Amino acid sequence: MVNEIEKQEQGFSLLEVIITLSIISSCVLLFSLAISQIGSTRAAVKDDRQIEW
């Protein structure tokens, strides 16, 4: 009975932690790239609007 409880309370393995961190870091990287792309697109649109006037 005691062995069954100890087996159920195991934590995450190193492989699971590495995979999770890589997924989270990829999401953060893509988010930061998207934010920078949005900023450059807004600047280009603003320049085009100034040229029209």
Image: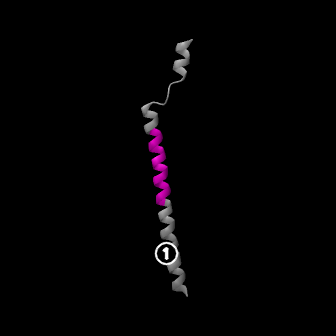
Residue at x 56%, y 18% (from the top left corner): 5
Q: Residue furthest top?
A: 1
Residue drawn where x is 53% and y is 78% of the image: 46
Look at the picture and state if 11 lies above or below 29: above
- The span shown in magenta is 19-33
The picture places residue 29, in percent across and down from the top left corner, at: 45, 53
* Residue 23 colored in magenta in the image: yes
Q: How many marks?
A: 1
Name the residue type under label 1. Ala
Rendered view: 30 above or below 8: below
Residue at x 57%, y 11% (from the top left corner): 1
Q: Which residue is mark 1?
A: 44
Query: What is the secondary structure assignment of the residue under circle 1?
Result: helix
Q: Position of residue 50 (x, y in %)?
A: 52, 84
Count neighbours of disc 1 (C-alpha within 10 A) and say few if under 14, some if 14 to 19, many if 20 or more: few
Could you tell me what secondary structure mostly forms the magenta stretch? helix
Position above or below: 9 against 1? below
Q: Is residue 33 left or right of residue 4?
A: left
Q: The C terminus is located in which quarter? A: bottom right
> Coloured how?
one colour
Q: Nearer the viewer, residue 41 or 24?
A: 24
Going 51% across and 80% down the picture, which residue do you hit? 48
Residue 9 or residue 33, whichever sits in front: 9
Q: Furthest-bottom residue in view?
A: 53
* x, y percent for residue 51: 51, 85
